[in-house]
Amino acid sequence: MADRPFDEARSEAFAGRMMDVLNGAGIALMTSIGHQVGLFDAMAGRPPATSHEIAAAAGLNERYVREWLGAMVTGRVVDHDPADGTYALPAEHAAWLTRAAGTNNLSLQAQYVPLLAQVEGPIVECFRNGGGVPYAAFPRFQRLMAEESGAVHDAALVDAILPLVPGLPERLATGIDVADVGCGSGHAINLMARAFPHSRFVGYDFSEEGVRAGREEATRWGLANARFEARDATDLGARERFDLVTAFDAIHDQIHPAHVLAGIAEALRPDGVFLMVDIGASSRVHENTEFPLAPFLYTISCMHCMTVSLALGGAGLGAMWGEQTARAMLADAGFDCVEVKRIEDDLVNTYYVATKG
Ligand SMILES: C[S@@+](CC[C@H](N)C(=O)[O-])C[C@H]1O[C@@H](n2cnc3c(N)ncnc32)[C@H](O)[C@@H]1O
């Protein structure tokens, strides 16, 4: 390697790529803001408009909107006509940036960039000294997570995800006991409880904020069959109590994921099913170069999922633990039969249907 001559063309190309990275980072921050203040929604479907008209339509300060439009035009997100000073969001771009785009709304994901940037200082310290950054350092996390998973669950939980388990919708309709481990803000539990009034649902999470949000939504929806418990999932303390346990994106950031999986196996009745949803990457980094959003997901893992576990003295498995490790850990926990499935609305997650055999 040391003998290889310096490749000027490769170096030039890489400099260009790094400049794209910097521009992409700027666009990501502006995209996050555009989503939060409703600029993409305000521009979608509208004829070309001036910055004053766009600011008025969105109820925002024109000077800020004009600078934001500068980033969006040079970033090739928004079209600009210099002759009349107007801006337009093409329909093809709005399809990936607005709330109406549902699960395709990538502007929602852009919010992770500022969220992670808030903990850059403490993460730098962890690189030097080890340890982790606790959940308390991420005050926006529960809200963003709920927004992200809510879009997928609203679109697909009842109609596409639950039917991945053969016969499950029928069993839910008849009436079974269900637990969601690491339920976050509890929207999945409430959606299932509303769709299947004869079944009984409980959501577990150690986030008081998450559990409170779940309870409030259940009350708003008038659900008598959904409840929430603030508890550490490391010790579920249940034996053969559930017919279905779900974990949506919640195993890889556990303190002790192996204990949690073993606890879930113990909590299930003999014919019970564990539906585990997690990032569908490979456990081998060289197999992830083509995985959608891989660098972004490793970053979220390093600056959130892995570090929150390490902060509690945990395993620090990380979001990119991958299918091979997931299968091995499920087997160790006592799940003899594991089927791996995917759904159309979700590019990055794998759906594991695990039973005790
Ligand atoms: C990535 S979030 C997913 C939340 C939710 N399932 C969703 O899809 O929106 C992971 C959740 O696991 C919870 N969690 C992590 N470790 C936990 C533990 N040891 N006990 C209980 N909850 C835990 C976190 O508080 C967080 O709400």
Image (cartoon, grey):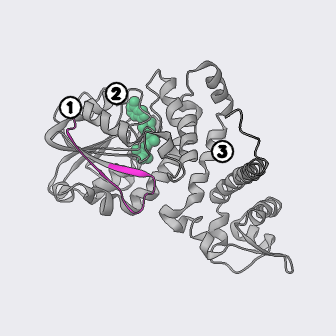
Q: Nearer the viewer, residue 169 or 131?
A: 131
* Residue at the limit of the structure toward the top, as seen here: 129
- Amino acid at circle 2: Thr
Range of magenta residues: 335-351
Q: Residue at x 17, y 39 (%)?
A: 356
Residue indicated by mark 2: 234
- Amino acid at circle 1: Glu
Q: Nearer the viewer, residue 286 or 152?
A: 286
- Whole-number angstrom distance, CA of label 3 to CA of label 1: 39 Å
For the C terminus, the quadrant is top left
Q: How far from the left and from the top, in percent, is residue 175?
A: 16, 52
Residue 248, compared with residue 234, is above or below; it is below
Q: How far from the left and from the top, in percent, is residue 26?
A: 73, 52
Secondary structure of the residue carrying numbered label 2: loop
Asked whether the viewer can see residue 356, the reply is: yes
The circle drawn on residue 266 is 1
- Whole-number angstrom distance, CA of label 2 to CA of label 3: 30 Å
Q: Are marks 2 and 3 in contact (CB under 8 Å)?
A: no
Of pointers 3 and 1, the one earlier in the residue sequence? 3
Q: Nearer the viewer, residue 113 or 21?
A: 21
* Residue at the limit of the structure toward the right, as seen here: 83
Q: Are marks 1 and 2 in contact (CB under 8 Å)?
A: no
Q: Residue at x 40, y 60 (%)?
A: 154
- Amino acid at circle 3: Pro
The circle drawn on residue 114 is 3
Q: Residue at x 27, y 57 (%)?
A: 164
Secondary structure of the residue carrying numbered label 3: helix
